[in-house]
Amino acid sequence: MGKKTLPAFEKFVNDLRDIWAEFPDDETRMKRAHVLMERDLLSDPALREHCKKWPSTEGRKNLLFYTDPEYGFVINGVVRVPGRTGSVHDHADGWVLYGLLDGTESLERFRAVESRKDDGYVKVELVSDTKGEAGKADLVPPFDIHAEQGSDIRSVAVILRSRVLVGEVLQGRYDRETGEYYEGSGPQQIPYELSA
Ligand SMILES: [Fe+2]
């Protein structure tokens, strides 16, 4: 008996491949994906049930569901334990669509008020703090400075990345208190099958 990929996930991947084939630029692709993710994926009852069993990704990990062999987009999962605080970072030149599947989180956005990256210093300032609810996705453009914060309950997100980041590019990391800036690799990728 072979395991079967969750139908909503399989459809999402196929629809993404159509979008990637049709449009050449990542901004258009990711905006299209945003609509699709909220409409077809985050609303899927089977996936919402399935995600209750996903393991915690504490310790800077991501579940790795899929990497497209042709177009290079990546689909990850993240499971935050109650009370999880997130650090301030960017995703280098990748676009990231961050869709909340279960629980609540808040997304903080920052701007650089003083930037001397060569000296390891970027002073950041909080510009907004938006509450995320299950079923909604947030699109984060390249080099946008942000942090995802957990809540007092477990929360689960599905993440679409326009390109492979881990192992290929370093991402900016920011200390909101001291202004320290450095670049490092993104979360460890843990392969995980989305099958029924
Ligand atoms: Fe992020």
Image: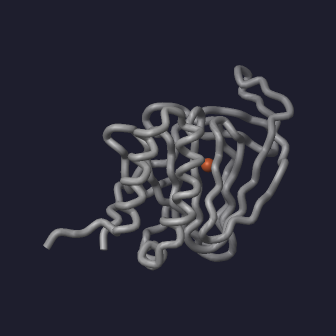
Total of numbered circles in the picture? 0
Return the residue found at the far top: 118
Location of residue 37 in the rendering, given as x and y in whole percent from the top left corner:
53, 60
Location of residue 128 in the rendering, given as x and y in whole percent from the top left corner:
82, 53
Asked if residue 97 is positioned above or below residue 155 in the image, the reply reads above
Closer to the camera in the image, 72 or 35: 35
User: Which of the 4 image quarters holds residue 21?
Assistant: top left
Whether residue 105 can be seen here:
yes
Which residue is located at x 46 percent, y 54 percent?
76
Image-based side of 61 in relation to 177, left or right: left
Return the residue found at the far front: 22
Image-based side of 74 in relation to 139, left or right: left
Closer to the camera in the image, 180 or 73: 73
Closer to the camera in the image, 101 or 88: 101
Whether residue 58 can be seen here:
no
Which residue is located at x 42 percent, y 50 percent?
189
Asked if residue 35 is positioned above or below residue 96 in the image, the reply reads below
User: Which of the 4 image quarters holds residue 19?
Assistant: top left
Q: Quadrant of the N terminus?
A: bottom left
Location of residue 38 in the rendering, given as x and y in whole percent from the top left corner:
57, 63
